[in-house]
Amino acid sequence: MDPNEEILLARLKEGDNAAYKYLFDRHYAVLCHVAFQYVRDCYLAECLVGDVIFRLWERRRTVSINSSIRSYLMASVRNRCLDYLKSRPVRTETDLGLLDDNAPASSSPLGILLEREMEYAINDSIEALPEKTREVFKMSRFANLKYEEIAARMGISSNTVKYHMKAALAALRESLDKYLVLAFLLFLIH
């Protein structure tokens, strides 16, 4: 778990209302979107997310979170939604309001929020790469240069360029792995 999240969790366990408000503000919108994917009802999704976050507050002194707080909350919301779906009677009608494809999801506030969070994560991960690796990656991906062109500009061999690209992609894959769920959500709403 991230050290900042450990501090937040410690403050939450002490009953700090500001920590609870921060947790709520930071995660509520994404959690509502996750819940909506299961229950297909905005109001119900908000209620279920509210239940999960409130339950975390009730259990704050005894809760044990080993992953990130967001991962914990997403798993809790998923489980709460699945429990709800198991307990309700089977519905046969379709809510036709869900079938409106006229407005692209990316123009919705949540779609924009998810895209922006993903963009920040990608940019931060790229900037965290070692200088030469970052430079090679940017030339390849953003300037669309071939390995030979990059090698000539930087005065290094093509094999060194390949090494830097391999290192960059491995580092990005590792650092962005936690955003796989977010990418999946973006895919779902597009």
Image (spheres, grey):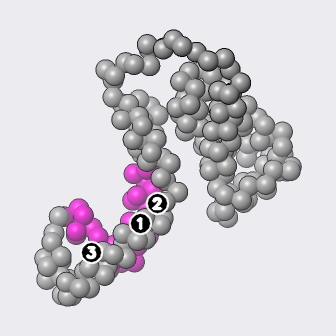
How many C-alpha atoms fall within 10 Å of the one at disc 1: few (<14), some, or many (≥20)?
some
Task: Look at the image and tell me in which quarter the C terminus lies.
Answer: top left
Residue 102 vertical position relative to residue 115 in the rendered view, above or below:
above
Q: Alpha-carbon distance for marks 1 and 2? A: 6 Å
Q: What is the quadrant of residue 8 in the picture?
A: bottom right
Name the residue carrying label 1. Answer: 172
Name the residue carrying label 3. Answer: 136
Residue 91, can we see it?
yes
The amino acid type of the residue labelled 3 equals Val
The amino acid type of the residue labelled 2 equals Leu
Name the residue carrying label 2. Answer: 176
Q: Earlier in the sequence, mark 3 or mark 1?
A: 3
**Secondary-structure class at tag 1:** helix
**Secondary-structure class at tag 3:** helix
How many C-alpha atoms fall within 10 Å of the one at disc 2: few (<14), some, or many (≥20)?
some
Q: Alpha-carbon distance for marks 3 and 2? A: 19 Å
Q: Earlier in the sequence, mark 3 or mark 2?
A: 3
Q: What kind of secondary structure does the magenta stretch mostly adopt?
A: helix
